[in-house]
């Protein structure tokens, strides 16, 4: 639950719950303008990753839509084979792709020449915040460019990107922190005493 939920529980149920931070579930929040401009020393690593990807060949991005959802499905299945991925993650991704329009999802696909190498997919969770739910890449070092292309394509009203939690996975935590979040949406666990 959020800090506001904790305050509610303390007020209306005093002494009933133990409230503990759940850092593995804290959500990473990014300032869209900072992420697209990437100014200053703190974004040197991100700029280097993007420049490396751009030097590696002809990469371009296109919007995810009904006509290219089979490409996202194919990327997901290929990604799963290469990584011995958790079947729940794969099934949830395939379910999201199948219900792309009814879930009001938005995303992009990154191609090298005409070969798809990854995709992002998410939704608008508030008027000014976009949440990336899914990101799958088949090549190393294209993720930063793929996200940059998505951030640039979002409507002007979007000010923040929510890249969700790191699930307590060390590599994911490092990756998300390297991307320079501007804030964290802290999550707490309530346990009845």
Image (cartoon, rainbow, N blue to C red):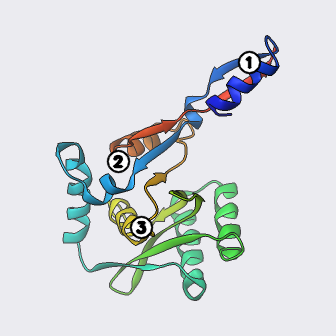
- Check whether the beta carbons of the residues at disc 3 and disc 1 lie within 8 A of each other: no
Q: Where is residue 169 in the image (x, y as percent from the top left)?
A: 51, 38
Q: In this view, does 16 lie to the left or right of 56?
A: right
Residue density around tag 3, few if under 14, some if 14–19, many if 20 or more, within 10 Å: few
For mark 3, what is the residue? 156
Q: Name the residue under label 1.
A: 10
From the top left corner, tell me how far across and down residue 87 is, in percent: 68, 57
Q: Where is residue 36 in the image (x, y as percent from the top left)?
A: 30, 60
**Which comes sooner in the sequence, label 3 or label 1?**
1
Report the residue at 46% width, 63% height from top: 157
| Marks 2 and 1, the one that precedes in the sequence | 1
Element assignment for label 2:
loop
Disc 2 to disc 1: CB gap under 8 Å: no
- The residue lying toward the viewer, choosing from 53 and 189, is 189
Question: Helix, strand or loop at disc 1?
Answer: helix
Q: How crowded is mark 1: few (under 14 residues within 10 Å), some or many (20 or more)?
A: some
Farthest top residue in view: 15
Q: In which quarter of the image is the N terminus?
A: top right
Q: How many marks?
A: 3
Give left or right: position of 85 versus 62.
right
Q: Is residue 135 above or below residue 175?
A: below
Question: Which residue is identified by label 2?
Answer: 179
Q: Looking at the image, which residue is at 32% across and 65% down?
A: 145
């Amino acid at each position: 639950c959020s800090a506001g939920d904790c305050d509610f529980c303390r007020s209306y149920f005093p002494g009933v719950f133990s409230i503990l931070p759940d850092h593995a579930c804290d959500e990473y929040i990014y300032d869209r303008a900072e992420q697209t401009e990437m100014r200053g020393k703190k974004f040197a690593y991100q700029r280097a990753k993007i420049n490396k990807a751009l030097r590696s060949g002809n990469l371009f991005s296109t919007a995810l839509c009904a006509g290219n959802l089979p490409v996202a499905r194919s990327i997901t299945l290929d990604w799963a084979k290469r990584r011995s991925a958790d079947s729940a993650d794969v099934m949830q991704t395939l379910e999201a792709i199948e219900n792309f329009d009814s879930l009001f999802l938005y995303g992009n696909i990154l191609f090298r020449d005409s070969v798809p190498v990854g995709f992002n997919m998410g939704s608008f969770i508030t008027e000014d915040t976009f949440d990336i739910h899914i990101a799958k890449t088949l090549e190393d070092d294209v993720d930063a460019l793929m996200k940059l292309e998505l951030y640039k394509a979002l409507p002007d009203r979007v000010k923040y990107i929510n890249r969700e939690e790191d699930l307590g996975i060390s590599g994911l935590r490092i990756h998300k922190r390297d991307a320079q979040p501007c804030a964290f949406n802290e999550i707490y666990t309530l346990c009845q005493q």
